[in-house]
Amino acid sequence: MEKWKTLQSEYIHKSDFGNIRKDNCELLDGTIIEAYHVNEYPDWVNAVVITKEKEIVIVEQYRYSGNDTFLEIPAGNLEEFETCEAGIVREVMEETGYISPHRPILLGEFMVNPATQTNKIKTFLILDAEKEKEQNLDDIEDINVHLFNFDTFGHMLRSSSLKTQLFTAHAYYMAKDYLT
């Protein structure tokens, strides 16, 4: 399948959180889209973290756009020149205080929403994690850490009895598949 042709591109917003770009595109049949908006966000990493006791480590935080508090797996952006493995180990330690003696296991890499976003996410599994440190949160982070039995968390996802987002559910089922 052939790609659309970009005729013109301009930024309508730039910030530390991401950019919004407006493109004029020509489709294969000659149709012109005069304002296709693209959200440019940095790539990020996330991880399903499981303790030696087979509990999943979950972070709870307020999400402004969702106007509520959500339960999620630890995640974050990479720092400059940081590998994905190093980035997820750092993010998990900063957000939760948990570390593992094992290297993170890559479960997959995916586009977040290729219809309107440019970023990718790499999902990892971290096993045998133990609480070793206190949280070291960024200035804008306010995070509570919770532990759930791994299987019970799956039942909560299926019954929609918790507030979460797509990438937590997706990562959980990838980890469950890997572990079985």
Image (cartoon, rainbow, N blue to C red):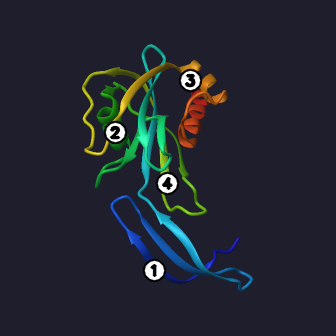
Verify CB contact (< 8 Å) between mark 1 and mark 4. no
Which amino acid is tagged 1?
Answer: Glu
Badge 4 crowding class, 10 Å Cα cut-off, few under 14, some 14 to 19, many 20 or more, is some
**Sequence-first disc among 3 and 2:** 2
Residue 81, how many percent across, how many down?
29, 54
- Label 1, secondary structure: give it: strand
Q: Which residue is mark 4?
A: 120
Q: Which residue is mark 1?
A: 10
**Sequence-first disc among 1 and 4:** 1
Which amino acid is tagged 4?
Answer: Lys
**Sequence-first disc among 3 and 1:** 1
What's the distance in space between the residues labelled 1 and 4, CA to CA? 22 Å
What's the distance in space between the residues labelled 4 and 3, CA to CA? 25 Å
Which amino acid is tagged 2?
Answer: Glu
Verify CB contact (< 8 Å) between mark 4 and mark 3. no
Verify CB contact (< 8 Å) between mark 4 and mark 2. no
Residue 148, how many percent across, how many down?
49, 20
Which residue is depicted at the point 25% across and 44% down? 139
User: Which numbered disc, 1 or 2, marks the residue closer to the eye?
Assistant: 1
